[in-house]
Image: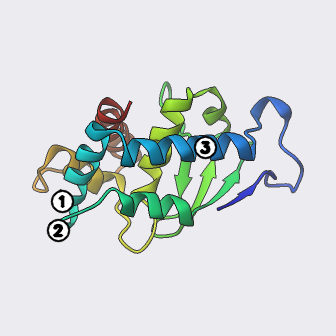
């Protein structure tokens, strides 16, 4: 895991928006705990994996995605922020590169860990987008939302709420 604490101009992040490597390590430790030792979280994540891939899944595969990730800290808010919807991170679909935005600084440690789990589903060669994750979370791939910014926000926040309910 690599953490880059520089903003887009190459300058250090302002203190009030800075997460440290220790913050990210703490979030990763909590995420791993939730995925492996929190039975309710592990069962729900494995149900999602089963809905997505139809195999005998293990939440350890999500831990492995987190272990492979590179975390970049941005001083700028996400362009996906909208009203009371705040993006804490984005992942380059199919990559292991995660950008963490200033909003993450205001999250509770538990919510930050759940956010890392959320982003892990967007990582690697089996990455899924928020629309696919929403379908998997409700167990129905025949439903859809409009592929618009508002549809994306709804899909992302809906399946994330379910993830939070099971992994807090």
Q: Position of residue 5 (x, y in %)?
A: 79, 51
Mark 3, secondary structure of its residue:
loop
Mark 2 is surrounded, within 10 Å at the Cα level, by few (under 14), some (14 to 19) or many (20 or more) other residues, namely few
User: Circle 1 sits in a helix, a strand or a loop, which is it?
Assistant: helix
Circles 3 and 1: CB atoms closer than 8 Å: no
**Residue picked out by circle 2:** 55
Foreground: disc 3 or disc 2: 2
**Residue lying at 20% horizontally and 67% vertically, measured from the top left:** 53
How far is disc 3 from disc 1 in space, using C-alphas?
31 Å
Dot 1 corresponds to which residue? Answer: 50
Query: Residue 119's spot in the image, x, y percent?
Result: 46, 52
* Sequence-first disc among 1 and 2: 1
Image quadrant containing the C terminus: top left
Question: Does 87 sit above or below residue 90?
Answer: above
Identify the image quadrant of residue 76. top right
x and y, in percent, of residue 73 in the image: 71, 49
> How much space separates mark 3 and mark 2, taking CA atoms?
35 Å
Q: Which of the two labelled residues, at mark 3 and mark 1, occupies the earlier sequence position?
A: 1
Please give the name of the residue rendered at 75% of the width and 42% of the height, measured from the top-left corner.
20
Q: Considering only vertical position in the picture, is 158 above or below 1?
A: above
* Horizontal relation, residue 102 to residue 12: left or right: left
* 110 in relation to 4, above or below: above
Name the residue at the front extreme: 37
On-image quarter of the N terminus: bottom right
Answer with the quarter of the image where residue 96 lies: bottom right
Residue at point 24%, 53% (across, down): 46
Residue at coordinates 54% horizontally, 62% vertically from top-left? 67
Residue 145 showing in the rendered view: no
Can you identify the residue that label 3 sits on?
A: 78
């Amino acid at each position: 895991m690599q953490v880059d604490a520089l903003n887009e101009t190459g300058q250090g992040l302002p203190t009030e928006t800075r997460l440290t490597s220790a913050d990210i390590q703490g979030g990763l430790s909590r995420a791993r705990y939730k995925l492996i030792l929190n039975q309710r979280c592990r069962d729900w994540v494995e149900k999602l994996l089963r809905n997505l891939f139809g195999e005998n899944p293990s939440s350890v595969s999500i831990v492995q995605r987190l272990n492979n990730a590179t975390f970049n800290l941005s001083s700028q808010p996400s362009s996906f922020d909208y009203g009371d919807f705040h993006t804490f991170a984005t992942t380059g679909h199919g990559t292991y590169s995660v950008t963490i935005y200033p909003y993450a600084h205001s999250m509770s440690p538990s919510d930050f860990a759940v956010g890392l789990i959320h982003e892990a589903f967007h990582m690697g060669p089996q990455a899924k987008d928020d629309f696919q994750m929403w379908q998997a979370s409700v167990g129905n791939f025949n439903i859809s939302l409009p592929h618009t910014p508002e549809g994306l926000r709804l899909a992302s926040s809906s399946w994330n709420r379910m993830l939070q309910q099971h992994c807090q």
